[in-house]
Image (cartoon, coloured by chain):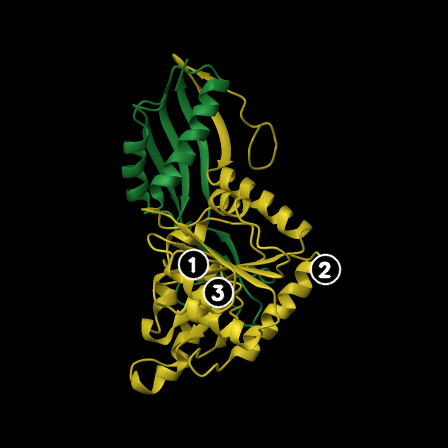
Amino acid sequence: MCGTCGCGGDSPVPTAGGVDVELHARVMAHNDHAAEHNRAHFREAGLTVINLMGSPGAGKTALLEATARARPAWRLAAVSGDLATDNDAARLARAGIPSRAITTGTVCHLDAEMLHHALHHWSPGDTEVLFVENVGNLVCPAIFDLGQAANVVCLSVTEGDDKPLKYPVMFREADLVVITKADLLPYLPGASLEGLRASLAQVMPEPRCIVTSAIGDDGTDEWLGWIDALCARTRGGES
Amino acid sequence: MHEYSVACALLDQIEAAARAHDATAVKVVHLALGAQCGVEAGLLTGAFELARAGTVAAEAELSIRPVPVRWVCPRCGGERPSGAPLVCPDDGTPARLEAGDELILERLEMEV
């Protein structure tokens, strides 16, 4: 049967010495199926899962550290993907977030089965919010659904105002963009929040961004409010 | 370089279809590839040529049909030009992606 709409459209058409088969199947169907399995499991467990993406060094780990500092009572957990080392997971554990590393070796992204496997071997207890800190990369993680409730992309002001135009797929998939390191703006003559916002508007029909600086905890309240609203939506079954 | 993972997923689907139709070989794999599907055609072709070895598609040609990106206003049907904000210039309605994010195995030509 046709993998797109179930229309039965794979009826083979005989050709000379062979057969032509219409399939119309999504190539990512296997990962998407595994992601739906994860999503159903997360919903059942009352767990809000946030897929946190961004360039290497964008400030993903620092954002999570700031989150734990601001809300020590929240029951957070994290899975961190990196090609090598468990440094980020260790940093998060020191910040009070129970964490596990997924060391991917040469693989540039996490996929739904990797996350499933990691969580099978580690249950973070009565967690409310699980952050999946994806491999630092603005290309590959964008197309692998993990079963998350939302995609968040960290974008530091040092990366250039036109970064969203260079990586449109990643930003198109984002439910929220967290602009990080905003305290550095006075030292970057070519960078501006207006420029970043104009770029986001060309790749996201409804851009939503929060401006933060983890050093001064600026913007953290707005970020925490966004997580709160997401958790309420997830528990309400909308996500 | 996630294209190798994508090529392996594609080959899994090709092999399943070949088994279902008792095919002895796959000759041509027809793929629709959106300009914003997150996969690069050249890299995918290279990855496919590596990953197909030893499979029923070992000699298969990968024929890629590129699909351009189309952002359209769901209210007035107007298309948003590249480089413009993705909202309707008349009333700010957010545009919708009508095409360009697909990665679809459309058709297989096989020997039986």
C-alpha distance separating marks 1 and 3: 10 Å
Q: Chain of mark 3?
A: A
Q: Chain of mark 1?
A: A
Residue in view at x 32 percent, y 43 percent: B41
Which type of secondary structure does the marked residue at label 3 adopt?
A: loop
Which type of secondary structure does the marked residue at label 1 adopt?
A: helix
- For residue A236, the mark is 2
- For residue A61, the mark is none
Amino acid under label 3? Met
Q: Say if mark 1 contacts mark 2, CB within 8 Å.
A: no
Chain B drawn in what color? Answer: green
Q: Position of residue B28 (x, y in %)?
A: 36, 26
- For residue A170, the mark is 1
Which type of secondary structure does the marked residue at label 2 adopt?
A: loop
Circle 1 residues within 10 Å: few <14, some 14–19, many ≥20:
many
Residue under pointer 3: A204
Outermost residue to the right: A236
Reading the chain from its start, which is encountered first: label 1 or label 2? 1
Q: Chain of mark 2?
A: A
C-alpha distance separating marks 1 and 2: 27 Å
